């Protein structure tokens, strides 16, 4: 006699579990995607702190590379996209941000290789060390590709996290002439003009 109610309870649990396995809807997925990119963007917009230029720029590039590592890990955990073409766009976003990470990492290695005992050489060679970042500005940004999907573009505009990401991206573009290496996920970058 107890088998009937127990079987019904097991069936109910199985159905509920099945409902939860579908994954996030388009809005939640888009929110998560933007939330994953935000830490990198916030770090990139902060720019280098005041201080000795080689150390300040090297520290900034290191912080930004670490933020990109976290962003890429969060994007890996995002899960399948709930819209057609979304997985391709997510892969393109990860690939684009992977290229940005490589540029930051490469620039950091070049900055770290400068001889701090020769301040004139550091001042002369620092802009050249940041050249990998300058190349980023000539490409289409990863977020441009994401917002090119009509369904994701709608959820992107409705997302608070994506709105913040857009504002940070706009701030990065506006600040580009002032910082030694400000990059946004839409591909905008600049070397500093403070020489």
Image: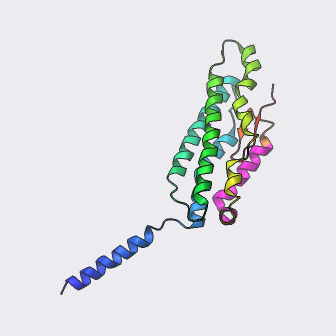
State the extent of the magenta-drawn residues as a range.
Answer: 153-174
Residue appearing at x 68%, y 33% in the figure:
48
Q: Quadrant of residue 25?
A: bottom right
Q: Quadrant of residue 63?
A: top right
Q: Is 124 a magenta residue?
A: no
Position of residue 2 in the picture relative to residue 103 (left or right): left
Q: Main secondary structure of the magenta part?
A: helix
Residue appearing at x 59%, y 42% in the figure:
68
- The x, y position of residue 105, in whole percent, is 61, 32
Vertical relation: 173 (above or below) 15? above
Count of numbered circles in the view: 0
Q: Is residue 30 visible?
A: yes
- The x, y position of residue 157, in whole percent, is 70, 63
Q: Is residue 31 visible?
A: no
Position of residue 148 in the picture relative to residue 86 (left or right): right
- The x, y position of residue 5, in whole percent, is 25, 84
The outermost residue toward the top is 117
Vertical relation: 147 (above or below) 44? below
Q: Quadrant of residue 138?
A: top right
Q: Is 168 a magenta residue?
A: yes
Query: Split into 4 quadrants, where in the image is the N terminus?
Result: bottom left
Frontmost residue, 137 versus 159: 137
- The x, y position of residue 115, in whole percent, is 66, 15
Vertical relation: 98 (above or below) 146? above
């Amino acid at each position: 006699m107890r088998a009937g109610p127990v079987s019904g309870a097991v069936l109910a649990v199985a159905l509920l579990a099945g409902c939860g396995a579908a994954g996030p809807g388009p809005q939640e997925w888009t929110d998560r995607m933007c939330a994953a990119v935000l830490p990198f963007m916030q770090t990139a917009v902060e720019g280098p702190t005041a201080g000795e230029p080689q150390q300040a720029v090297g520290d900034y590039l290191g912080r930004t590379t670490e933020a990109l590592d976290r962003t890429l890990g969060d994007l890996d955990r995002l899960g399948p996209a709930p819209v057609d073409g979304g997985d391709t766009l997510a892969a393109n976003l990860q690939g684009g941000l992977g290229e940005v990470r490589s540029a930051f990492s490469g620039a950091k290695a070049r900055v770290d290789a400068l001889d701090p005992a020769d301040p004139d050489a550091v001042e002369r060679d620092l802009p050249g060390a940041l050249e990998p970042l300058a190349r980023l500005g000539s490409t289409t940004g990863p977020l441009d590709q994401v917002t090119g999907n009509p369904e994701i573009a709608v959820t992107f505009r409705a997302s608070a996290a994506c709105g913040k990401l857009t504002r940070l991206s706009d701030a990065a573009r506006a600040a580009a002439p002032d910082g030694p290496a400000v990059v946004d996920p839409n591909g905008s970058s600049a070397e500093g003009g403070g020489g």
